């Protein structure tokens, strides 16, 4: 009975705590102050919440020189049918208030396609532009928001889903991302984990990734398994 209740509460959290708003679900429809949401998260006792998913690689952060901050819109030629969307810092502040009140542990999925371009079909090329992620992480640290781990990209490995990145290119970019984390988190013990690739296993792709990145860059592998359907 307790397990069923916890699974039900987890479903409630997944449905009602998106970090960005889609064209179908505007931001104001998600009430982060609703007491049921906070109680559901607290029921898990330090629940780990992953902020990411299909659209994370199309999210820009409203910091630094990034402007204007526009929401997602439906576009026929966009990744998964959406344009680039923006995460405002007021929204990020509200989310962190919720996390700190409930004791949630945060894993944040970083946009790993920023600066790249679509070559054909699902293949993306070009160097990752780290400036927006750098400014966002710097802001997060300045506000004292605890992030347990940063995940680089969503389902870009192997054959990808909506987009894929060459393993050697991904490996070079996680080296740069690791350097950013070391630079911004001054104390070694305060550095969050770097996770990746957040996708499906492809032996050749993974081998090339680690041949490029070397030891000690990616702290933990994140792997997606959809035995019970998409999103589960």
Image: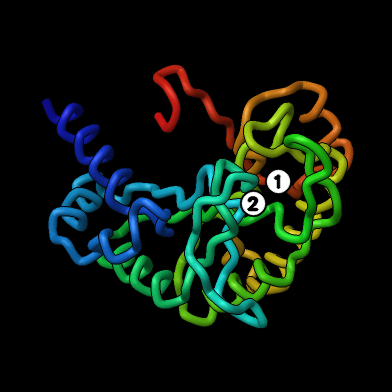
Query: Looking at the image, is 107 positioned above or below residue 228?
Result: below
Q: Which residue is mark 2?
A: 194
Residue drawn at 82 percent across, 23 percent down? 204
The x, y position of residue 174, in whole percent, is: 76, 52
What kind of element bears circle 1? Answer: loop
Neighbours of disc 2 within 10 Å: few (<14), some (14-19), many (20+): many
| Mark 1 Cα shell of 10 Å, populated few (<14), some (14-19), many (≥20) | many
Residue at the spot x=13%, y=60% of the render?
A: 35
Q: Residue at x 73, y 36 (%)?
A: 122
Which residue is painted at 63% across and 56% down in the image? 111
Element under disc 2: strand
Residue sitting nearer the eye, 160 or 103:
160
Q: Identify the mark at residue 218; answer none if there is no mark.
A: 1
Q: CA distance from mark 2 to mark 1?
A: 5 Å
- Asked where in the image residue 9 lies, by quadrant, the reply is top left
Q: Which mark is residue 1?
A: none
Question: In which image quadrant can residue 79 be found?
Answer: top right
C-beta proximity under 8 Å, tags 2 and 1: yes
Which percent across, then down, holds residue 71? 48, 64
| Mark 2 vs 1, N-terminal side | 2
**Residue 193 appears in the figure:** no
* 28 displayed left or right of 81: left
- Quick check: can you spot residue 155? yes
Residue 99 position in % (x across, y down): 33, 62
Instruction: Give the quarter of the figure containing the C terminus.
Output: top left
Quadrant of the drawing holding the N terminus: top left
Q: Pinpoint residue 49: horizontal percent, then vertical percent.
A: 40, 49
Whether 212 is drawn above or below 189: the answer is above
């Amino acid at each position: 009975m307790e397990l069923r209740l916890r699974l039900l509460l987890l479903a409630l959290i997944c449905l009602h705590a998106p970090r960005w708003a889609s064209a179908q679900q505007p931001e104001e429809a998600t009430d982060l102050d609703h007491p049921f949401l906070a109680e559901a998260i607290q029921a898990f006792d330090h629940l780990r919440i992953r902020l990411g998913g299909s659209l994370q690689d199309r999210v820009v952060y409203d910091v630094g020189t990034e402007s204007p901050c526009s929401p997602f819109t439906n576009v026929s030629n966009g990744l998964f049918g959406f344009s680039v969307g923006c995460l405002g810092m007021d929204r990020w502040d509200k989310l962190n208030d919720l996390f700190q009140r409930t004791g949630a542990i945060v894993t944040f999925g970083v946009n790993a396609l920023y600066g790249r371009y679509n070559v054909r079909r699902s293949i993306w090329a070009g160097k990752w532009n780290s400036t927006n992620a750098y400014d966002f992480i710097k802001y997060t640290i300045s506000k004292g928001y605890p992030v347990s781990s940063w995940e680089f990209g969503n389902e870009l490995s192997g054959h990808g889903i909506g987009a894929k990145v060459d393993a050697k290119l991904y490996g070079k970019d996680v080296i740069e991302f690791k350097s950013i984390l070391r630079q911004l988190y001054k104390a070694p013990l305060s550095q969050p984990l770097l996770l990746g690739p957040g996708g499906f296993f492809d032996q050749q792709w993974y081998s090339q990734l680690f041949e490029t990145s070397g030891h000690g860059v990616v702290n933990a592998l994140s792997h997606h398994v959809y035995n019970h359907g998409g999103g589960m």
